[in-house]
Image (cartoon, rainbow, N blue to C red):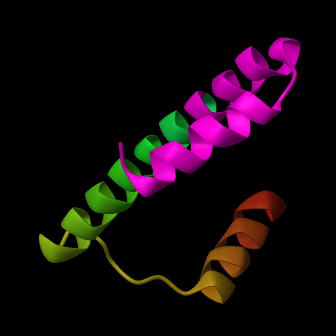
Amino acid sequence: MTNTTEKAAAALELLPEEMREPAIQYLLEQAEKFRALKEAVAEGLDDVTRGRVSEWDFQDFLREAHTARLK
């Protein structure tokens, strides 16, 4: 086991039995969120690399949205 895994296991052992499963579930949920975020960032960076992203001016966007709303 790695040092981090050993520390996590030791921390879980310090918890009362009824708190261990929720703690493990929380860690799994956070790991899944991290993995999804990591994949989304990689996809975004790939979009930039392939030229599929264009810069836009937020002020222009707001002006256009305001103009469209007035019509």
Q: Position of residue 42 (x, y in %)?
A: 29, 60
Which of 46 and 14 lies nearest the eye of the viewer?
14
Would you place residue 39 above or below residue 49 in this image? above
Would you place residue 27 above or below residue 62 in this image? above
Q: Answer with left or right where residue 28 lies relative to residue 66.
A: left
Q: Residue at x 79, y 59 (%)?
A: 69
Q: Residue at x 27, y 69 (%)?
A: 45
Which of 22 and 34 lies nearest the eye of the viewer?
22
Would you place residue 36 above or below residue 47 in this image? above
Q: Answer with left or right where residue 8 lies relative to residue 34.
A: right
- The rendered magenta stretch, by its main secondary structure, is classed as helix
Quarter of the picture holding the C terminus:
bottom right
Q: How many marks?
A: 0
Q: Residue furthest left?
A: 50
Q: Position of residue 36 (x, y in %)?
A: 44, 42
Quarter of the picture holding the N terminus:
top left
Q: Answer with left or right where residue 37 lies relative to residue 51.
A: right
Q: Quadrant of residue 26?
A: top right
Q: Would residue 5 be counted in the magenta stretch?
A: yes
Q: Position of residue 23 (x, y in %)?
A: 74, 28
Q: Residue at x 70, y 62 (%)?
A: 68
Q: Would residue 23 be counted in the magenta stretch?
A: yes
Which of 60 and 27 lies nearest the eye of the viewer?
27
Q: Position of residue 28 (x, y in %)?
A: 56, 29
Q: Answer with left or right where residue 57 lies relative to residue 46.
A: right
Would you place residue 39 above or below residue 61 in this image? above
Which of 31 and 41 lies nearest the eye of the viewer?
31
Write the start and end of the magenta stretch as one range: 1-28
Q: Residue at x 61, y 30 (%)?
A: 29
